[in-house]
Image (cartoon, rainbow, N blue to C red):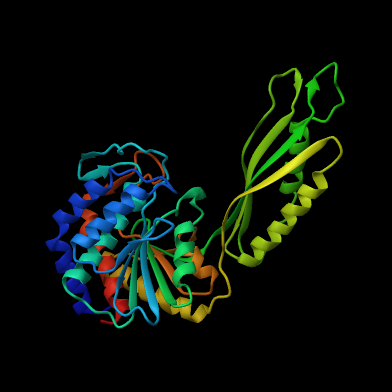
């Protein structure tokens, strides 16, 4: 860990902690469901322009991309997502007491986004010129059925030149260096139905769907990497005395290995085909795909993660918690590029409406984020 960089980052964080907290209070009230991040995107773009950004755009996926340094060669990316897991379209409720700020999505990922923005402010107002092109991305669609569409767009637009990717997401001292991929489906069975006594013997959609679930739960997951599956929701039927005309379920499987995901896809398809028959229809809708780890240079990834861990531990004084997760880093990791997702705030109750962040942790998180940025850009 470069001591000069840490001193610089620490001083900047201390000097801007009031501005940082106020920006969080403002940004944290702006609703941003996945695929509806427009209001936050406009706010972030305008804020960056006010800090002196010369090249900042909102792309087709509602990512806000701020470009700094030479854009004709290799690029590195730092990102934080604008969307939150809740569907609110009215201003988000917020409360503050006992040194904590409470709001839906306030830590996941609004506080991390604020730290990314303050890093941009440091670079822009200090006229820092990195040796490699830098993309600072406030990206869309990280949560749920956003399906990482924002990061997918970034790699569609710049992927051939991106050499490293870091996202700010989650809580300190977390570090993700392995992608938990997932495939998600809605499966629906439809039949003629009828009266439970007068039409007894006709196919029942609930019974058929239950048989499919039994087949799915008989699958032995591949052992090359941790691989799981789950039926998370099931609904259907009308009343106790009707043969169910329709039933549906939500099903997913997950793995850190893209190869294992492909094997699970084959098993899923085979189970569905075995459940088809006369007198009923089975429909499969793919709701989302998040890729797992691709063909990675493990040595390069370990070196990249080692640097992140060193910075996390130097700034927080805690042992870094390295674990696989499903984050924006899934996309670069699936493409074989080194990537980490790093928490830059302390808080709790993520994905609940009572989520909170510790206000005193904000400068520490900004120091961590800025150390990571400055350490990579080679200015």
Q: Quadrant of the N terminus?
A: bottom left
Image location (x, y in percent) of residue 332: 49, 69
Q: Is residue 362 above or below residue 210?
A: below
Q: Position of residue 341 (x, y in %)?
A: 41, 64
Classify residue 175 as left or right of residue 332: left
Q: Nearer the viewer, residue 162 or 256?
A: 162
Where residue 48 appears, x then y in whole percent? 24, 61
Number of residue marks? 0
166 or 362, nearer to the observer: 166
Say if 154 sits above or below 82 in the image. below
Extreme residue toward the left, this view: 15
- Which residue is found at the position 68% from the left and 22% from the top? 238
> Looking at the figure, which quarter contains the C terminus?
bottom left
Quick check: 373 above or below 284?
Answer: below
Viewer can see residue 93 = yes
Residue in view at x 16 percent, y 57 percent: 17
Q: Is residue 292 left or right of residue 66?
A: right
Image position, residue 243 (x, y; %): 77, 24
């Amino acid at each position: 860990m470069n001591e000069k960089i840490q001193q610089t980052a620490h001083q900047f964080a201390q000097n801007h902690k009031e501005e940082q907290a106020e920006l969080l209070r403002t940004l944290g009230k702006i609703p941003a469901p996945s695929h509806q991040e427009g209001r936050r995107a406009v706010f972030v773009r305008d804020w960056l322009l006010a800090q002196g950004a010369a090249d900042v755009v909102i792309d087709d996926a509602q990512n806000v991309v701020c470009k700094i340094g030479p854009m004709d060669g290799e690029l590195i990316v730092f990102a934080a997502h604008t969307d939150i897991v809740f569907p609110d379209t009215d201003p988000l409720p917020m409360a503050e007491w006992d040194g904590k700020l409470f709001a839906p999505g306030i830590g996941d990922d609004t506080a991390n986004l604020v730290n990314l923005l303050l890093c941009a402010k440091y670079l822009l107002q200090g006229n820092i010129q990195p040796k490699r092109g830098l993309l600072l991305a406030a990206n869309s669609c990280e949560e749920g059925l956003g399906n990482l569409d924002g990061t997918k767009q970034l790699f569609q637009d710049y992927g051939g030149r991106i050499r490293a990717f870091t996202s700010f997401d989650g809580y300190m001292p977390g570090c993700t260096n392995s992608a938990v991929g997932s495939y998600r489906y809605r499966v629906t069975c439809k039949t003629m139905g009828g009266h439970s006594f007068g039409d007894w013997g006709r196919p029942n959609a609930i019974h058929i769907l239950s048989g499919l679930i039994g087949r799915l739960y008989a699958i032995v997951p591949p052992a090359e990497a941790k691989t799981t599956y789950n039926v998370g929701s099931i609904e259907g039927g009308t009343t106790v005395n009707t043969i169910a005309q329709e039933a549906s379920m939500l099903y997913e499987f997950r793995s850190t290995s893209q190869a294992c995901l492909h094997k699970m896809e084959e098993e899923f398809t085979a189970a569905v085909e075995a459940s088809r028959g006369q007198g009923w229809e089975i429909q499969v809708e793919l709701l989302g795909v998040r890729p797992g780890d691709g063909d990675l240079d493990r040595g390069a990834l370990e070196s990249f993660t080692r640097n992140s861990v060193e910075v996390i531990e130097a700034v927080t004084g805690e042992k870094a918690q390295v674990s696989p997760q499903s984050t924006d880093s899934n996309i670069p990791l699936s493409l074989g590029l080194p990537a980490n997702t790093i928490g830059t705030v302390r808080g709790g109750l993520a994905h609940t409406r009572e989520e909170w962040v510790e206000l005193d942790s904000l400068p520490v998180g900004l120091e961590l984020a800025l150390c990571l940025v400055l350490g990579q850009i080679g200015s």
